[in-house]
Each structure stands twice: as structure tokens, then as C-alpha cells.
Image (spheres, rainbow, N blue to C red):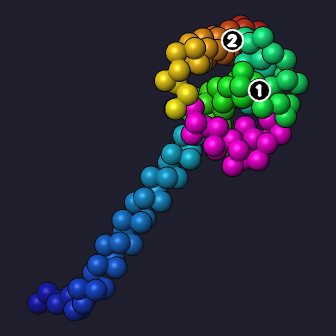
């Protein structure tokens, strides 16, 4: 004769379903973390160097305390490229700029509002393209050296 499963209250079944759902979510996040760890991210300092190289400003000016619009826009573009495009953390971008992560968070969020300005958008697209191209060239030359 088959055993009768013990009675489980609806509240207990609901909690078990939630627990199973949380376990699946944790497993999914762990897989995503492993994927991120496997990626070969370019150093955030190199991204900043390339942003400076493709603008009319130095690293010192970009990382300085000036609030001039053109420098603030370059910082905003750098943050977008480092965090949104390459997946660096806000903290790593903040450390390189000598800023607090909340300042970087504000700058990241303001990027989407600034993109409506044609001159900002053109500068952002050009710099992002140049940074990606510069990083691709470096990666290619590293592979050639290693071969």
C-alpha cells in the first residue's frame, strides 16, 4: 500500500514555493557572476586614458575638480563607457575619478538626459567608438605578441 503524504497547510506550501523560487534566482545570479568573472574587462584606467586621448583634455583635467561643462560631459561619457558598455562597477569608476560612487551614479543617470543634445550625442558616440577601437587594437596586438 502506498504511503499517504503528510498534510501540509497552504501556508507551508506557499513558503516552500517561495523558497524554491529564491533558490532558482540565486542559482541564476551565481551563473551570471561566473560569466562576468570569465570576461576579460579592459582596465578602467585604460578606458579613461583613451577617453582623454580622444578629447582635447588631459587626464589631470578630466579627473580634476573643475565643473566646466565640457569636462563634466567627458566624465559622464567615461562613466557610461566604463559602467554601461564594459560592465565595470560604479565604485571602480569613482575610484579612478577620485569621486564618491553616488556622484558617479548621478552622472551615469544624467547621461540619458544629455544624449538629447546633438553635440553631446555626437561627442559621446565618437569617443565611445574610438575607445572600443583602441581597446580592440590593443587586444589584437597582445594576441599577436603571445603567438
- Front position in the image: 133 or 19: 133
Q: Nearer the viewer, residue 23 or 67?
A: 67
Query: On the image, numbered disc 2 is attached to which residue?
Result: 134
Q: Quarter of the image containing the N terminus?
A: bottom left
Q: Is residue 98 magenta?
A: yes
Point 42% across, 66% down: residue: 22
Q: Residues within 10 Å of mark 1 (few under 14, many from 20)?
A: few
Q: Quadrant of residue 106?
A: top right
| Picture disc at residue 137 | none
Above or below residue 44? Residue 102 is below
User: What residue is rendered at 85% in x and 17% in y?
Assistant: 58
The residue located at (80%, 25%) in the rendering is: 62
Q: Is residue 80 left or right of residue 1?
A: right
Q: Position of residue 104 (x, y in %)?
A: 69, 41
Tell me which numbered mark, 2 or 1, is placed earlier along the sequence.
1
Q: Nearer the viewer, mark 2 or mark 1?
A: 1
* Total number of numbered discs in the rendering: 2
Task: Give the structural element (helix, strand or loop) at label 1.
Answer: loop
119 or 12: which is nearer to us?
119
In the image, residue 91 lies at what x, y percent?
72, 45
118 lies above or below 108: above
Could you tell whether 15 is left or right of 115 in the image? left
At x 83%, y 39%, the residue is 98
Tell me the number on the disc at residue 68: 1
Q: Quadrant of residue 11?
A: bottom left
Where in the figure is residue 67, as x and y percent of width and height? 78, 31
Q: Is residue 18 magenta?
A: no
Q: CA distance from mark 2 to mark 1?
A: 27 Å
Q: Is residue 9 above or below residue 124?
A: below
Q: Which residues are magenta?
A: 91-111
Amino acid at each position: 500500500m502506498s504511503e499517504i503524504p503528510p498534510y501540509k497547510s497552504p501556508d507551508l506550501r506557499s513558503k516552500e514555493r517561495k523558497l524554491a523560487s529564491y533558490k532558482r534566482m540565486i542559482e541564476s545570479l551565481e551563473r551570471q557572476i561566473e560569466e562576468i568573472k570569465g570576461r576579460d574587462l579592459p582596465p578602467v584606467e585604460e578606458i579613461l586614458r583613451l577617453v582623454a586621448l580622444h578629447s582635447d583634455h588631459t587626464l589631470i583635467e578630466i579627473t580634476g575638480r573643475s565643473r566646466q561643462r565640457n569636462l563634466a560631459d567627458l566624465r559622464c561619457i567615461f562613466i557610461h563607457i566604463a559602467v554601461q558598455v564594459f560592465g565595470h562597477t560604479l565604485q571602480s569608476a569613482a575610484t579612478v575619478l577620485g569621486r564618491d560612487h553616488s556622484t558617479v551614479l548621478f552622472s551615469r543617470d544624467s547621461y540619458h538626459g544629455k544624449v538629447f543634445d546633438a553635440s553631446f550625442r555626437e561627442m559621446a558616440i565618437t569617443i565611445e567608438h574610438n575607445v572600443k577601437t583602441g581597446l580592440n587594437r590593443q587586444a589584437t596586438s597582445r594576441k599577436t605578441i603571445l603567438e
